[in-house]
Amino acid sequence: MNSALKLRRFFKLLLCGLFVTPMAWSQLYSADEGRIIYGHHHINTQDLESQQRFWLEGLGGTVRTLGETGREVIAFPDVLVFLTDAAPTSGTRGTIVNHVGFETTDIYADVARLQALGYRMITREELPATYEVTGGIGRRVAGNTIAYVLGPDDIKVELIENKDIAHPIQMHHIHWASEAGEDMREWYAEHLGAVSGLRIGQPAGQLPNVNLTFGPSETRLAPTQGTVLDHIGFEVDNLKALCAELEAKGVVFDRPYAEIPALGLAIAFFTDPWGTYIELTEGLDSI
């Protein structure tokens, strides 16, 4: 983090009297575990109330405010959700980023709540026949327990039960659909430092608080910008330096590095070679 951003953040904390450790006031709990972590989902919608209901009542997020502007964001452990009033061109299915995934300690309670609120569980149509699906929840012998829900504006969200996590619900993965999964894994390793591996038999990269899973697709799918999941965001320590490194590797920025004092942020935007619109931030770890 550059010195100017650090100084502004310090004085904000000083004035508010928040003399606490970062873990006490940050939703990005993994911020100290690596230079680059996952930061946020950015949603396009013309029905802000419906999206707020889904993420708050349906999935259990909480409201936080950003910087001097007081802009509201929805917070979960290790991910923030931003909402923008704009008509999305499509849902997530059929785009390069098929869905986002959370882990939960009680998938049965979560699915019951989502169904009671009227959201459509799409688990059966999303899972292979090896899974038994009952009540919107998929299970397989000696395997995991998962569910898929289709939220407002057709945003697809996966839930995975894990009773051993530290929070009732927390960020788990971004799931791409691409004809070039192995190439994507290499690119995210080289450019964002993801540790290459496999998840559910698919090429994947691991950052401290998120798995980047590159699932298969027979064809190249639509880019994300303008869709319900307009872009994904990574939080960076020393963003200015990373931007210089990425430019040296050939990345062309849609919006170059800039500081926004009113938000207490530095930002930059670019699009990966497969159409994923990406925002890099520095400062969201203070929310």
Image: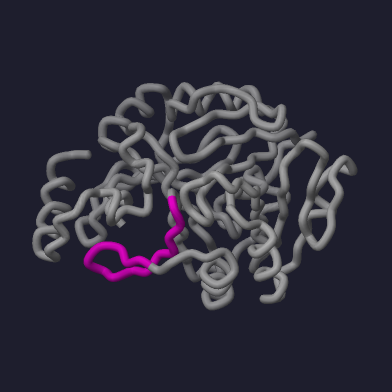
Confirm whether the magenta stretch covers residue 203: no
Res. 254 visible in picture: no
State the image quarter where residue 18 is shown.
bottom left
Q: Residue at x 59, y 60 (%)?
A: 228
Total tally of numbered discs in the picture: 0
For the magenta stretch, what is the residue range? 64-77
Q: Position of residue 161 (x, y in %)?
A: 64, 49
Q: Nearer the viewer, residue 79 or 115?
A: 115
179, above or below 79, in the image? above
Is residue 134 rendered to the left or right of residue 69?
Answer: right
Q: Residue at x 62, y 35 (%)?
A: 213
Is residue 97 rendered to the left or right of residue 237?
Answer: right
Q: Residue at x 58, y 40 (%)?
A: 275
Q: Position of residue 139 (x, y in %)?
A: 79, 47
Confirm whether the magenta stretch covers residue 72: yes
Q: Nearer the viewer, residue 80 or 209?
A: 209
- How is the structure coloured here? one colour
Res. 199 visible in picture: yes
| The C terminus lies in quadrant | bottom left
Q: Nearer the viewer, residue 221 or 99?
A: 99
Q: Main secondary structure of the magenta part?
A: strand
State the image quarter where residue 147 is shown.
bottom right
71, above or below 77, in the image? below
Q: Residue at x 26, y 31 (%)?
A: 241
Q: Position of residue 100 (x, y in %)?
A: 60, 49
109, above or below 215, in the image? below
State the image quarter where residue 80 is shown.
bottom left
Q: Position of residue 134 (x, y in %)?
A: 84, 58
